[in-house]
Amino acid sequence: MRVVLLPGDCIGPEVMAEARRVLEVVSPDVELDEQLFGAAAIRATGEPLPEATLEACRGAEAILKAPIGAPEFEAADVRPEQGLMRLRSELDVYANLRPARRDGIDVLIVRELVGGIYYGARGVREDGTVFDTCEYHPSQVDRVARCAFELARARRSHVTSVDKANVLETSRMWRRVVTEVARDFADVELEHMLVDNAAMQLIQAPERFDVLVTDNMFGDILSDEAAAVTGGLGLAGSASLGDGGPGIFEPVHGSAPDIAGRGIANPAAMLRSTALMFAHGLGRPLVARRLEEAVDWALADSPTPDLGGEATTREFGEAVLARLRV
């Protein structure tokens, strides 16, 4: 099996180095193929997603990506984030899995990733009006809903579909399609919830949720909220999955240019994304569980400065490896 590594920008190569060490220890049979992506790729080739990188990704079993982005490209015409949007679209990784766990809270948000307002028509009219269009086809809703129901079957068998059906036509269609899909999953309970209520419930009673499924923009916002409730973006990993092709596994936090090069970045989210890759990309759930437990242990035993500790990025990685070797 082959995994493409995209080291990313700023702290990206630092946290990826710890993920690579873990991969070399627990899965020496997996070939690791490092490719240019993001700001580093723009500097080298002028493009955030070079064709060579895209082809390597298409032929891999999984893609492990570190954070991208650099201050010099924030207002540029060509930006690192454009490469990520294109990679997601080219691989059609339509289901973004964002787990959030902590002290009795165990929520999985399934976000539709390649449709909606982020991919709809946009532009500027002659009178100066600017528009972004939210568009969905029923088939896009059907497939992400089925993914959510399948995942719920392996958890607590409850799906909350989040929309804004009292206002938006896309949400009314979303609700109809999810209701139809639910008929094929009689063993899974379905509830519908408006997004503003869901946002409030995630803060007041996050333990009530099992699996949430929602559209691209709502999922973007709610998954960051769930991460904040359970420890912060610095600890959150994600998996983006499609049908048959390679998935993309990445932390959800940014590239943190303010601490780049200081050796203090927290690699927990990068390592949790690696665990998700073992579970959903490489078919090794036992390895995934061991790595998750090792990361949890290291967070308590060797916290980095962002968590009030003194461990360096390397020392945190050493703690994870030590636990894996027990």
Image (spheres, helix red, strand yellow):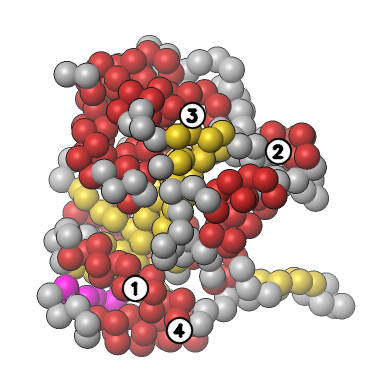
Residue at position x 70%, y 38% in the image: 41
x, y percent for residue 105: 20, 48
x, y percent for residue 234: 42, 35
Kindly identify which residue carries mark 3: 16
Does the magenta segment cover residue 63? no
Question: Label 1 is placed on what type of residue?
Answer: Ala
Left or right: 58 with respect to 82?
Answer: left
x, y percent for residue 233: 42, 40
In terms of secondary structure, what is the magenta stretch mainly?
A: strand
How packed mark 3 is, by other alpha carbons closer than 10 Å (few <14, some 14-19, many 20 or more), is many
Residue at position x 15%, y 45% in the image: 104
Pointer 1 and pointer 3: residues touching (CB < 8 Å)? no
Residue 150 makes an appearance in the image: yes
Magenta part of the protein: which range?
A: 188-193
Question: Label 4 is placed on what type of residue?
Answer: Pro
The front one of 40 and 135 is 40
Kindly identify which residue carries mark 2: 41
Kindly identify which residue carries mark 1: 145
Q: Quadrant of residue 222?
A: bottom left
How far apart marks 4 and 2 lie (CA) works out to 36 Å
The numbered mark, 4 or 2, whose residue comes first in the sequence reads 2
Question: Label 3 is placed on what type of residue?
Answer: Met
From what the image shows, is residue 204 above or below residue 73?
below
How far apart marks 3 and 4 lie (CA) works out to 37 Å
